[in-house]
Each structure stands twice: as structure tokens, then as C-alpha cells.
């Protein structure tokens, strides 16, 4: 950071965005979460990244630039080589009559400016840009994957017979993983087909075709993946699971590997577990202020159970990790049992389920309770035995977190009762249930506004929803929305990144009565709405009105009748 913590504190206090008491809480959070003070201020939503940049630039008396709002020409960008740009956190973004304009996280770094001045023979004008903004801009350095691959093929192919020659398969696999990481992919698929193989990336929850490779190269790629993840290279008829760990840029990337034999050969799926996901706060995930208040009230209690629900890939684990970060202090003994351990958390005892050693969720949980824990995380409640032990743990003075595969928050309550947990135990232990989905955010680089009529809205939403969210605003006939046009940054999708839509069901006295009476989920859900719970659909539409996403995206993900 170009400013010291003392300078940063003075700067933030002068804005009146936070007082001394609030600042003390942020400093404590930064210490517990092992993040910088600036990152803590951003994670706690005390200040936006852009406004933070403006303040720092004013303090430095250096002009500020927001790279995410610019279109940078390739010839300008490549004035600074990628390796140098990443090492020193600098981006060349424009050139004018005075010389080259350079975005820097440390505009006082004369070593870099002097180097570029000697290299180009032009004057270098430094601008301040935030680290997050610059990191997001590195994406522009990446060529299209197919272009890079075709260049490799051309370079190494034998001229005589057009074969693949000494094509460096290790470099190809490294390039695939690096490209997936740079594009914020959660999964990398290598799928054999009849005459070739297809590489696909899952970006923001959607699979994208990225690369076609020759059939005879596919087997070599699979073999290389097996070697890297320490799997048997001579086994082609059985499924195999493995893992690998790679050092990429400034973080260690954990990768889960699954090999599955299909009709046309072996398919590989690599799950990329980036520590970037583990650094997100509940605010970063998109939880509203009212829902955050419910969460903070629940976790302030010394015991009870907090559940996160939703289908696979809805961000349940990320939300639970974000809550654990808030509770992770040296005064608490936090132990988790997971299948598998996706992200390492400093100061937390994490156990990996191992059925071969009879270490299941149930047996592991029993062992944990003998370890004097304050807080326990059970990765997932899958069976009757685990459900019973987890509920009893919450009843005997422990704070228990877990996830459950249900469509919404209210369905989790009868689901636990179906698992033979007594209704009075469910009612007395569960504090809140978080239901969630992940929706794609609009790309900030190509987002534009447009207007639509109330009549057009009626094609997507019920009269009740329109009345609730749109009509009261001046009784207008038109509503302003936003959409993404598509650009290089978002792969022409109009979306970049994801954010959560939430519903937080607080177990009140009225809800407890319904649970003990074994009422179904619809009755419980209605009672929760009557008490002020915001549904996932409502939360999504609120995000639409704020210009964060589109109605189509909200309806696609929530899959709720409007």
C-alpha cells in the first residue's frame, strides 16, 4: 500500500464514513482475517473501491484513473510486457502528445517509470489506480486460447507428415489451467468426442466452448493431467479422483481432478479452488443490510445452528466460510469436517472426510465434540445420523454451521424432521436458515441503460411484484433498467462475475410453533414472509433496480413463478 496505515486511518476518518468505534472494529477484523486495513475497509463495505482510489490519489496529489471504465488498445497495453505489469502492478492505458499514461498502485515507483522512459524514449505520466482495478485489467493481456493453441501446433507440427511431433503437452496443460484461472473459471472440462476433443470453461456458472484439439492429442493431455494429480496412467476403464496444487501469480491454486471413462475416451474435469473466493465477505456476496443484521444477531449467540441451503453450485460453502471469518478469533476453537476441504482457513482446524478410514461426517462430528470446540462446521448434512448429532451438538452449547440441499430456506425445516430429528429439537436449535442462488452480474465495462414499459414487465413478473417494486415510483409507465452490450472483458456475454440472491429465515416464536406442529414448508414460508422475510426473487429484483443484473437472469436462476 502506497499509504501507511496511520495515513489511511486519518484519510478515512476525515471523510466521516466511519467513526473511531467503527474503525476499531475494522482493525480487529483485519487482524483476525489476516488482511490489510485497506482490504478490510473494502470488505466491510465502508468505502467503495473507486472512492477509495479517489481519496488516495488526492492524498498523493496524483491523478486518478478507473481502468474498468476505459477501452485500452492492444498496442498501448503491450507497451508494458505482461510479466513486468504483473510484477509491479502497472498498466499502460493511453498515449497522447505528452507521452505514455501509466496506471500504477505506487505512482512514486521511479524505478518502473525510468525503465519505461528508457525503453520507449517517451515521457511517462503516472496515474493512481487501485490494486483491484489493475488486477482485473490483466485479463486483456490474454490472447484467445484457440489462437495460442494454433500457434503452438504450427510451431511444433512436423512438416513431413503434418503430425504433432514434439508438441510440449506439459506446456499445453499449464496454458489451459492458467487461462482458466485468468478467466475466473470454476471448472475446466476436457471432453473427448468422435473426431476431436473439446475444452470448456465454466465461467459465472455457464459452460463456454473454448478450444478444439486433435483427437490424438487428447490422450496425451489426459495422461499429463493424471501425472500432475498422481493418478494411475495405465487405468482407462475406471473413474479416478485426485488433486494437484499449483503456484500461479501470487496465490497457490488447489485443483480437484475427476477422470471418467465415457464412450469416446476419458473425460477430465478440473475444479479450480482459488483463494480469491475465500476472501469474499457477505457484503461482497451481495447480502442486503437487513439480512446481514439477522446473520449478525444469530452469530452473536453462543450456541445454536445456522444452515445454508440451495442446490449444488449456489455458493453455500462460500457464505458459510464468510461467516466463519467473522467469528475466527484466537479465543475460539473452530473445527470443521468437510468433503472435501475446499479452502484453507488460518487458525481453523479442518478435517477431510475419509470413508476408507471410517471417518464419516457422523464419526468425525462425534470426535470433534470431544475436542472442546466453540464452533463446528459440518460440510453437509446428508443422513439421519449426522443430522441428529449436529442438532444435539447445537443443543449442548455449541455453535453449529452446516449446509443442506433444499430449494429454499423454509423447506430445510421439514427436511430435518424427515431425517428423524424431533420437531421440538429443530425448533429450539436452529436460529436462521440462509437460502441462496448465484446470479451473473452485468459487466461494468459495457453496461448501458434502457427504458421499458410496465406492460412489457408484465410478461415477466406478476402484478403483485410489479406493484411492490416498480409502480410506487411516481406511478410511472416506464422503468429504467440496465443490460450488457457484450465486450472482450465479458466474452461478449454482457455479464462479468456473480453475486448472490438471498432469503434469510429467522426462527421466531411464531415459526417455532409451526415447526412443532409439523406444518409444511409452504405454511412456514408464508409466515416468514408475513414477518418481513425477503424472498430470493424479491432480493433479485432489488438488484435489478440497482443496475446489478437483469430480470431474465434473476428468473433464470431463482426458477420461481412470479
Image (cartoon, grey):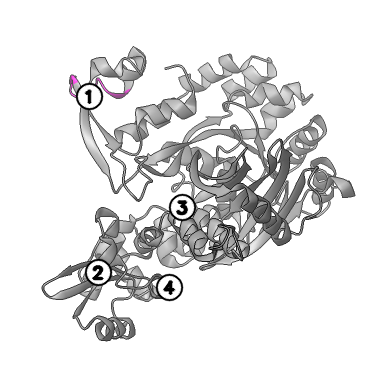
* Residue for badge 3: 146
Helix, strand or loop at label 2? It is helix
Based on the picture, tell me whether residue 474 belongs to the magenta stretch: yes
Closer to viewer: mark 2 or mark 1:
1
Closer to viewer: mark 2 or mark 4:
4
Based on the picture, tell me whether residue 189 belongs to the magenta stretch: no
User: Residue at coordinates 48% horizontally, 27% vertically from top-left?
Assistant: 558
* Residue for badge 4: 83
Who comes first in sequence, dot 4 or dot 3? 4
Closer to viewer: mark 4 or mark 1:
4
Tell which of 388 and 494 is nearer to you: 494
Q: Please state the extent of the stretch shown in magenta in the rendering.
A: 469-477
Q: Is residue 347 among the parts visible in the rendering?
A: no
- Kindly indicate whether the residue at mark 2 contacts the one at mark 3 (C-beta within 8 angstroms): no
* Residue for badge 2: 57
| Real-space Cα separation, disc 3 to disc 2, in angstroms | 40 Å
Amino acid at each position: 500500500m502506497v499509504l501507511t496505515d496511520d495515513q489511511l486511518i486519518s484519510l478515512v476518518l476525515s471523510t466521516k464514513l466511519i467513526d473511531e468505534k467503527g474503525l476499531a472494529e475494522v482493525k480487529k477484523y483485519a487482524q483476525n482475517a489476516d488482511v490489510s486495513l485497506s482490504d478490510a475497509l473494502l470488505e466491510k463495505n465502508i468505502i467503495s473501491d473507486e472512492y477509495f482510489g479517489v481519496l488516495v490519489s488526492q492524498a498523493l496529489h496524483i491523478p486518478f484513473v478507473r481502468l474498468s471504465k476505459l477501452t485500452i488498445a492492444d498496442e498501448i497495453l503491450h507497451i508494458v510486457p505482461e510479466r513486468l505489469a504483473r510484477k509491479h502492478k502497472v498498466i499502460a492505458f493511453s498515449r497522447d502528445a505528452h507521452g505514455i499514461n501509466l496506471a500504477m498502485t505506487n505512482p512514486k515507483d521511479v524505478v518502473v517509470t525510468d525503465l519505461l522512459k528508457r525503453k520507449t524514449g517517451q515521457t511517462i505520466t503516472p496515474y493512481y489506480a487501485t490494486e483491484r482495478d489493475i488486477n482485473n485489467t490483466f485479463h486483456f493481456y490474454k490472447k484467445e486460447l484457440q489462437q495460442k493453441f494454433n500457434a503452438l501446433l504450427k510451431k511444433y507440427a512436423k512438416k513431413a507428415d503434418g503430425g504433432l511431433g514434439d508438441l510440449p503437452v506439459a506446456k499445453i496443460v499449464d496454458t489451459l489451467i492458467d487461462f482458466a484461472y485468468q478467466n475466473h473459471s470454476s471448472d475446466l472440462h476436457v471432453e473427448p468426442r468422435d473426431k476431436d476433443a473439446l475444452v470448456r470453461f465454466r465461467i459465472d456458472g455457464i459452460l463456454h466452448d473454448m478450444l478444439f484439439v486433435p483427437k490424438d492429442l487428447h490422450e496425451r493431455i489426459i495422461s499429463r493431467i493424471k501425472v500432475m494429480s498422481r493418478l494411475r496412467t495405465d487405468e482407462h476403464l475406471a473413474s479416478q479422483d485426485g488433486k494437484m496444487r499449483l503456484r500461479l501469480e501470487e496465490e497457490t491454486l488447489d485443483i480437484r481432478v475427476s477422470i471418467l471413462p465415457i464412450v469416446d475416451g476419458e473425460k477430465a474435469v478440473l475444479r479450480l479452488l482459488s483463494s480469491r473466493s475465500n476472501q469474499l465477505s457477505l457484503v461482497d456476496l451481495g447480502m442486503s443490510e437487513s439480512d446481514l443484521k439477522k446473520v449478525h444477531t444469530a452469530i452473536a449467540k453462543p450456541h445454536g445452528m445456522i444452515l445454508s441451503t440451495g442446490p449444488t453450485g449456489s455458493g453455500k460453502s462460500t457464505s458459510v466460510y464468510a461467516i466463519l471469518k467473522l467469528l475466527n478469533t484466537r479465543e475460539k476453537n473452530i473445527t470443521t469436517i468437510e468433503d472435501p476441504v475446499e479452502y484453507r482457513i488460518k487458525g481453523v482446524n479442518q478435517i477431510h472426510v475419509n470413508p476408507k478410514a471410517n471417518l464419516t461426517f457422523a464419526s468425525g462430528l462425534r470426535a470433534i465434540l470431544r475436542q472442546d470446540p466453540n464452533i463446528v462446521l459440518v460440510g453437509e448434512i446428508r443422513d439421519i445420523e449426522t443430522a441428529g448429532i449436529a442438532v444435539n451438538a447445537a443443543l449442548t452449547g455449541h455453535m453449529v454451521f452446516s449446509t443442506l440441499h433444499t430449494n429454499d430456506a423454509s423447506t430445510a425445516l421439514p427436511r430435518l424432521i424427515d431425517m428423524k430429528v424431533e420437531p421440538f429439537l429443530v425448533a429450539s436449535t436452529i436460529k436462521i436458515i440462509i437460502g441462496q442462488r448465484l446470479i451473473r452480474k452485468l459487466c461494468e465495462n459495457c453496461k448501458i441503460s434502457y427504458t421499458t414499459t410496465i406492460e412489457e414487465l408484465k410478461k415477466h413478473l406478476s402484478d403483485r411484484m410489479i406493484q411492490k417494486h416498480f409502480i410506487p415510483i411516481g406511478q410511472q409507465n416506464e422503468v429504467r433498467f440496465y443490460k450488457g452490450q457484450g465486450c472482450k472483458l465479458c466474452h461478449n456475454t454482457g455479464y462479468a462475475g456473480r453475486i448472490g440472491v438471498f432469503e434469510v429465515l429467522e426462527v421466531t416464536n411464531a415459526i417455532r410453533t409451526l415447526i412443532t406442529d409439523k406444518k409444511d414448508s409452504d405454511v412456514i414460508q408464508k409466515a416468514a414472509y408475513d414477518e418481513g422475510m425477503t424472498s430470493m426473487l424479491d432480493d433479485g429484483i432489488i438488484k435489478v433496480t440497482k443496475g446489478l443484473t437483469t430480470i431474465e437472469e434473476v428468473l433464470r436462476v431463482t426458477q420461481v413463478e412470479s
